[in-house]
Image (tube, grey):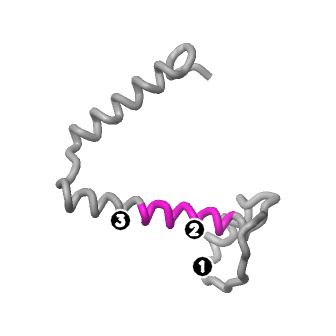
């Protein structure tokens, strides 16, 4: 069962609207815009979570970020047959 929908009027720059329309494919512009807005809401929620976590624990350092990226890369290599470059 799909979510209930509503009809809204929005205003955006014409070039952005035309680019979105060209990329929307068979699902249509409404679905394309809804997916983009959903992604933005996810990003906003993550940014709020980061702000709360940093307020409580302090900001994460560049070194900590790189360590986590390295761990993720190693985990992906272990899970992918033939390493990370396997297609």
Q: Residue furthest right?
A: 26
Mark 3: secondary structure:
helix
Residue 12: give its label: 1
**The quarter of the displayed image where residue 33 is located:** bottom right
Inspect the magenta stretch and tell me whether residue 34 lies in it.
yes
Residue 12 versus residue 26 in the image, above or below: below
Give the distance between the C-alpha atoms of the residues marked 2 and 3, in whole angstroms. 16 Å
How crowded pointer 2 is (Cα within 10 Å; few <14, some 14-19, many 20+) is rated as few
Left/right of residue 25 with respect to residue 35 in the rendered view: right
User: Is label 3 or label 1 in front?
Assistant: 3
Q: Residue furthest top?
A: 82
How crowded pointer 3 is (Cα within 10 Å; few <14, some 14-19, many 20+) is rated as few
Q: Position of residue 6 (x, y in %)?
A: 71, 81
Q: Residue furthest left?
A: 58
Mark 1: secondary structure:
loop
Front in this rendered view, residue 62 or 71: 71
- Residue beneath the point at 58% across and 19% down: 86
**What main secondary structure does the magenta stretch of the protein show?**
helix
Which residue was labeled with disc 2? 37
Which residue was labeled with disc 3? 48
Inspect the magenta stretch and tell me whether residue 44 lies in it.
yes
Residue 10 versus residue 42 in the image, above or below: below
Left/right of residue 74 with respect to residue 79 in the rendered view: left
Left/right of residue 7 with respect to residue 47 in the rendered view: right
Mark 2: secondary structure:
helix
Front in this rendered view, residue 63 or 55: 55
């Amino acid at each position: 069962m799909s979510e209930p929908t509503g009809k809204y009027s929005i205003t955006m720059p014409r070039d952005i609207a035309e680019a979105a329309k060209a990329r929307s494919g068979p699902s249509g512009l409404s679905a394309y815009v809804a997916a983009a807005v959903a992604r933005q809401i996810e990003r906003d929620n993550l940014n709020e979570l980061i702000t709360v976590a940093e307020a409580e624990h302090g900001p994460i350092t560049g070194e900590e970020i790189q360590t986590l990226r390295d761990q993720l890369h190693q985990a992906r290599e272990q899970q992918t047959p033939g390493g990370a470059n396997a297609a």
